[in-house]
Image (cartoon, rainbow, N blue to C red):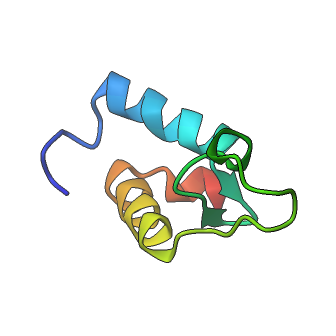
Amino acid sequence: MGFVSPFDPMWLDTLEAMDKKLVSDSLVYAMTPALAGWPAGQEGTFSLCTFWYVDALARSGGWRKRR
C-alpha cells in the first residue's frame, strides 16, 4: 500500500515467501490452511489478499517472471 519500497530486499523476500506458502493457482490464502485449523478441503482463498498480492507484484516488477 505504498509504505515500503517495492524493491526493498526484505519486501521481495516476503513476496517470495507468500508465493511459496500462500499462493495457489494465482489465488492467495489469508493464512496457511493447516495453521488455521480448518478441515481439509474447506479452506478458501481471500480475494482482497489476491488483489494486494497482484498490486505488490506489479509494483516490484515481479509479474514478469510469474506471468
> On the picture, is 41 further left or further right than 63?
right
Image quarter of residue 35: top right
6 lies above or below 44: above
For the N terminus, the quadrant is bottom left
**Residue 24 % position (x, y):** 73, 59
**Residue 28 % position (x, y):** 59, 61
Of all residues shown, which one is farthest toward the left?
3
24 lies above or below 32: below
**Residue 62 % position (x, y):** 49, 50
At x 72% / y 64%, what residue is drawn? 43
> On the picture, is 19 further left or further right than 24?
left
43 lies above or below 30: below
Decide which of 3, 36 is in the foreground and name it. Answer: 36
**Residue 40 % position (x, y):** 87, 57
> On the picture, is 27 further left or further right than 30?
right
Decide which of 46, 58 is in the foreground and name it. Answer: 46
Decide which of 34, 52 is in the foreground and name it. Answer: 34
Number of numbered discs overlaid on the protein picture: 0
